[in-house]
Amino acid sequence: MAMAVTPSISLQQITGLVLAGGRGARMGHVDKGLQLFRGKPLAAHVIERLAGQTGTLAINANRHQSDYAAFNLPVWPDLLPDFPGPLAGLHSGLTHCATDYLAAAPCDSPLLPMDLVAKLAAALSLQQADAAIAVTGRAGQTDLQRHPVFCLLRKTLLPSLTGFLQEDGRKMERWFAGIHTVEVHFDDETAFCNINTLQELRQLESE
């Protein structure tokens, strides 16, 4: 039976967070979210797709913060030094957000689903979980591809994530494995393609 995508959590309870805090190492250390895709920065595409899915939006960025501030959204840098990874972005988001839930997506995925948050919210509520992450692949198979940067988290997870990071935890899947996480299947794998190199950016733009 197909899962209904009607959100069981109101939009006003959800803060959306665009994760743009990385070093961009595989893209020559440029700021990925500011690279142009179809005439607009990658982050702009993600913002547009998330805007109608959450009550409010913010950006996690550690570099070029004035450029990200030009999107007229709050910019929340990591609260931990040395670019420790996307979990640090989630930590900053959970710390700053004034809502009960935080929905996150990376700045380098301009095709993310328009029903991403609704499906995550429906599954999280149904399973009474603390977190929901997106997965793709053949439904029912064991080799599903997990996409933990596309997630919905309860605000109450902040102490758990803080403790994990203080113990030098960095791997997203390890943290999610230690909390009540529900995996939510999406059919369109291309919606979750993330751009790591300039070559991948040009290739996607030409499709």
Image: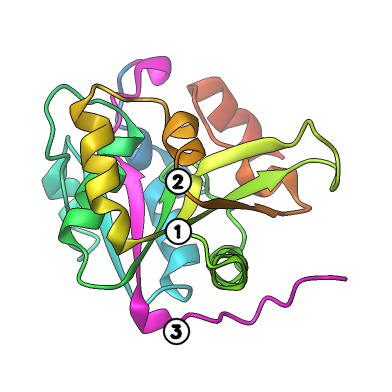
- The answer to whether residue 74 is above or below residue 83 is below
Q: Quadrant of residue 78?
A: top left
Q: Position of residue 167 (x, y in %)?
A: 22, 24
Quadrant of the snapshot with the C terminus: top right
- Where disc 1 sits, the SS reads loop
Question: Does label 3 or label 2 sit earlier along the sequence?
Answer: 3
The residue that label 2 is drawn on is 179
Q: Give the distance between the C-alpha atoms of the residues marked 1 and 3, in whole angstroms.
A: 16 Å
Q: Position of residue 112 (x, y in %)?
A: 58, 54
Q: Which residues are magenta?
A: 1-28
Tell me the amino acid under the disc marked 3: Ser
- The answer to whether residue 7 is above or below residue 83 is below
Q: Quadrant of residue 136?
A: top right
As rendered, which of 77 and 7 lies closer to the eye?
A: 7
- Which residue is located at x 18 percent, y 29 percent? 166
Q: Is residue 138 visible?
A: yes
The residue that label 3 is drawn on is 10
The residue that label 1 is drawn on is 130
Q: Position of residue 86 (x, y in %)?
A: 34, 36
